[in-house]
Amino acid sequence: MIGSRVAIAVAASILLAATVFVATSDAGLIPFVSIKTAPKATGAGQYDGRLRDLAVWLKDRPDTYFIWYHEPENDMDGPTFAKAFKRVRDVMKAANPQVKVGYSAMAFQWDGHVRWYREVVQKTPGAASKWGLTERGFKRTKSDQARANEIDRESTYLDDLPAGSRPAFYLYWNTKGTEGDPDLVNGPKARAAVARMVKTLG
């Protein structure tokens, strides 16, 4: 019975992903399809059939990116994620070699990101070939100078990564968002730090 509910939930997730894809594509945006399945069961191959079906469905949608388990850090350790993600990627690539499979980590928690990068990316062959930071925010900082210091620190860290391992992109929040939070807005000092990062990382 539990297995049936899980299968129904996965099927519903894929159906929802398909619906969102159509709306996103019609709006002229790049679609991302993201689903979550039980990590250990995924690593053991219990969702291989569903993942193959999804990979085949994505053949006619080559601009779409697939994300397995958005922000996994709170729910599993690095080795569990690495095993499951490798299974997902291998199964989907076998069904559709052109499918774009990636993951989205909690980039807004910098210390957590550094740990995650060390545990997963650096220990997984090929994982560092194309990655980036998205949704980077500076909510804990209470001044423009503090945000600038954070960006400079991250720029130095990223610049010191091995050749070929730098991120392909670095996206940060620069808006108050729906919560109206001024701590997420960069002032002149933080913007200057971003300009230094762009110059450093090119």
Image: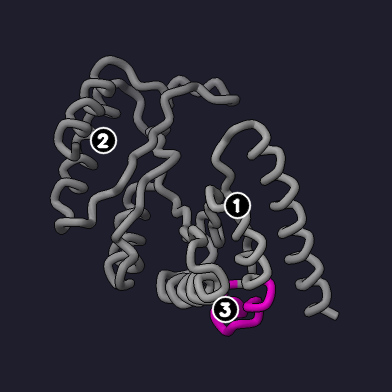
Report x, y in % for residue 105.
44, 54
Q: Which SS class for mark 2?
A: helix
Where is residue 174 drawn, in percent x and y?
42, 24
* Pick the front one: 8 or 56: 56
In the rendered image, residue 111 lying in the magenta stretch gets the answer: no
Disc nearest the viewer among 1 and 2: 1
Q: Quadrant of the N terminus?
A: bottom right
Q: Which mark is residue 150?
A: 2
Circle nearer the viewer, 2 or 3:
3
Image: 59 above or below 32: below
> What SS does tag 3 mark?
helix
Which residue has dot 1 on it? Answer: 61
Q: Which mark is residue 36?
A: none
Residue at the spot 37% in from the left edge and 55% down from the top edge: 112
Tell me if mark 2 has few (under 14), some (14-19) or many (20+) residues whose alpha carbon lies within 10 angstroms of its own: some
- Disc 1 vs disc 3: which is toward the camera? 1
Give percent across and percent down for residue 128.
30, 61
Quadrant location of the C terminus in the rendered image: top left
Q: Which mark is residue 40?
A: 3
Q: Amino acid at mark 1?
A: Arg
- Give above or below for 106 relative to 39: above
Asked if residue 64 is positioned above or below residue 174 in the image, the reply reads below
Magenta span: 39-50
- The residues bearing labels 1 and 3 have C-alpha atoms spaced at a distance of 29 Å
Q: Amino acid at mark 3?
A: Lys
Q: Is residue 198 at least partly visible in the picture?
A: yes
Does the magenta stretch mainly form a helix, a strand or a loop? helix
Name which residue type carries label 2.
Glu
Q: Mark 1 or mark 3, which has the lower sequence index? A: 3
What residue do we see at 65% from left, 81% from top? 46
